[in-house]
Amino acid sequence: FPNMNFGYDYNAFYMISLLAEAGAIDDAKKHLDILAKETEDYLNFYYSLDTDDLKVFGQEFAITDRTKDDILDIANKMKDQELIEKYKGMFAEYNLDKLRK
C-alpha cells in the first residue's frame, strides 16, 4: 500500500489534477479514489470533534474540507457520472452547516 508510505492529502490533489488534465483518466481515477478515502477518514475525525476541539485543527480542517470540494470538482470535470455520485455519497454527511448547529 504505497499510499500508507506517502501522504495523500491536498498536495497529492495537484498531481492528480495534472493526470486528469493530461488525459490519463484511469490513473487519475485510481489516485483520486485513494485521496477521497483519505479525505473521508480525516473528515470523519474532524466531524467527530466538538467545536472547541475542532478549533485546534482549524487550518488542517479547512484544507481537508477544501480537498473534498476539489475532489468533487475534478470528478465533474472528468464528466464521470458514476464517480460524481460515488463522491457525493461519500462526502454527503460532511457539510459545514452541520457544524454550525
Image: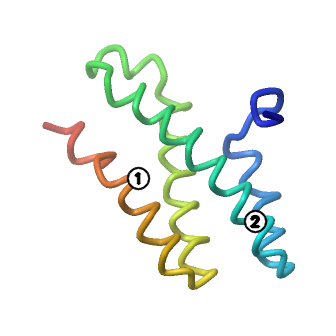
Q: Can you say whether 28 is above or below 32 in the image?
A: below
> Where 1 sits versus 15, above or below?
above
State which tag comes first along the sequence, 2 or 1. Answer: 2
Residue shown at 75%/65% (left/top)?
28
The image position of residue 35, as x and y in percent, is 64, 47
Q: Are marks 2 and 1 in contact (CB under 8 Å)?
A: no
Residue 61 can be seen in this image: yes
Q: Is residue 51 above or below residue 40?
A: above
Classed neighbour count for the residue bearing mark 2: other residues with Cα under 10 Å, few (<14), some (14–19), many (≥20)? many
Quadrant where the C terminus sits is top left
Can you give x and y, in whole percent of width and height, for residue 47 in the image? Answer: 33, 31
Q: Which residue is mark 1?
A: 90
- Where residue 25 sits, quadrant-wise, is bottom right
Dot 1: within a 10 Å radius of its alpha carbon, few (fewer than 14), some, or many (20 or more) residues? Answer: some
Q: Dividing the image into 4 quarters, which one contains the N terminus?
A: top right
Question: Amino acid under label 1?
Answer: Met
Q: Could you tell me which residue is drawn at 28 percent across and 47 percent down?
A: 93
Query: Residue 65: image x %, image y %?
Result: 47, 46
Secondary element under disc 2, as helix, strand or loop, is helix
Q: Is residue 94 above or below residue 82?
A: above
Mark 2 vs mark 1, CA separation in Å: 18 Å
Left or right: where 40 falls relative to 55: right
Q: How many marks?
A: 2
Residue under numbered circle 2: 28
Q: Nearer the viewer, residue 83 or 56?
A: 83
Residue 23 picture location, percent across and down: 83, 81
Q: Amino acid at mark 2?
A: Ala
Q: Residue at x 55, y 31 (%)?
A: 60
What SS does tag 1 mark? helix
Q: Quadrant of residue 2?
A: top right
